Amino acid sequence: MEVAGEPIRVQSLAQSGVTLVPPQYIQPPHHRPKHSSPLSPNTIPVIDLFGSDPARRDSVRDAIGRACSDWGAFHVTGHGIPTDLLRRVKRVGLTFFNATPVAEKLDYSSDPTSSVSEGYGSRMLERDDTVLDWRDYFNHHTLPLSRRNPSRWPHFPADYRAVVAEYADRLGSLASELLGLVSESLGLPTRCIEAAVGEFYQNITISYYPPCPQPELTLGLQEHSDMGAITLLIQDDVGGLDVLKDGEWVRVQPLGDDAILVLLADQTEIITNGKYRSAQHRAITNASRARLSVATFHDPAKAVKISPAPQLLSNAAPRFREVVYGDYVSSWYKGPEGKRNIDALLLES
Ligand SMILES: O=C(O)CCC(=O)C(=O)O
Ligand SMILES: [Fe+2]
């Protein structure tokens, strides 16, 4: 969407004082969040990693196995990432969105024709039936190091680039440790899933959801599962992320500055031959407070072929056909509405 040559950012729209959201942001009735009905009393599991204490590994691995098969999503604490670093990455992100002049922010605009390009952006109309998200974001390419170019990231606040780089490194190690525990929880060798994924292609997306005058008609981010292997997410205290559990949306309550949310993504579902499913999730909006989240995605390289782990096929048929990850990513943007992207790979059983 372009007006006078400038892309529209949701934050500018919200600040312009509109009382009715423009029609491009209005979800069809069946996608609208039900603000009137009570929230599900369910809460996603919280797992203390006890700083990787070897004496606790068996019980931690079992708890992770249960959370993966019941939810595909869980909080972790005791992960060893300093709370101060988690706070700092949210602070620098918020400073970019709130304290940088619009013109300067637009200097960092991402390529609007690609949904995975680096920089500052908002969802653009890709198809006539696409509804826009009530969200702006900044996407960073962080791993492997050959993709990392902090000069493309905000220069203000002064520590922005150093904080994001440190956060990227720490979360890459945590993702690797978690995939090890997920593998072991299925009786697979520790490095099984990570070896299938190969070197992590890590991207960090800081999302900013401005207050919305009609939250009952909009979504901050439409329902989806993440495409890669594993996503680690932190959020502020506003709340608005929902995870789908047995057909019901469950709010992921913010747990304070220390907790990190783990979301299994589609490639892990394929590699585990569907034993663990990726988490469907969405973000809702609210009328009074802007919300910030930081999602760190760990994906295979585009050329990597993904298929169910052979160890899981000794007495089960493969449920998914092999896919080249880059093909999977391009099919996402063309995928039919209302269907899970991964369903396209299902084999007849
Ligand atoms: O903002 C959130 O909590 C969700 C972000 C998300 O799901 C994504 O960026 O893929
Ligand atoms: Fe997501």
Image (cartoon, rainbow, N blue to C red):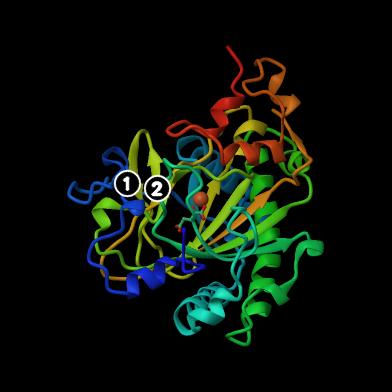
Near-viewer residue (60 or 229): 229
Asked if marks 2 and 1 touch (Cβ < 8 Å), the reply is yes
Q: Give the quadrant of residue 119.
A: bottom right
For marks 2 and 1, give the CA distance.
6 Å
The residue carrying pointer 2 sits among few (fewer than 14), some (14 to 19) or many (20 or more) residues within 10 Å by Cα, namely many
Question: Please, which residue is most extreme toward the bottom here?
Answer: 158
Q: In the image, 128: left or right of 271? A: left
Give the label on residue 198, or none. none
In the picture of the structure, the residue carrying the numbered disc 1 is 27
In the rendered image, which quarter is residue 78 located in? bottom right
* Residue located 50% across and 63% down the image: 234
Residue at 61% across / 73% down in the picture?
108
| Front position in the image: 291 or 72 | 291
Q: Is residue 154 left or right of residue 137?
A: right
SS category of the residue bearing label 1: loop
Residue 219, above or below 156 = above
Residue 210, image x, y percentages? 37, 68
Image height of 295 relative to 159, above or below: above
Residue at 27 percent across and 57 percent down: it is 215
Q: Which residue is mark 2?
A: 131
Farthest top residue in view: 349
> Which of the two discs, 2 and 1, labels the residue nearer the N terminus?
1
The 10 Å Cα crowd at callout 1, few under 14, some 14 to 19, many 20 or more, is some
Q: Amino acid at mark 1?
A: Gln
Residue closest to the eye, 60 or 121: 121
Q: Which residue type carries mark 2? A: Val
Q: Quadrant of the C terminus?
A: top right
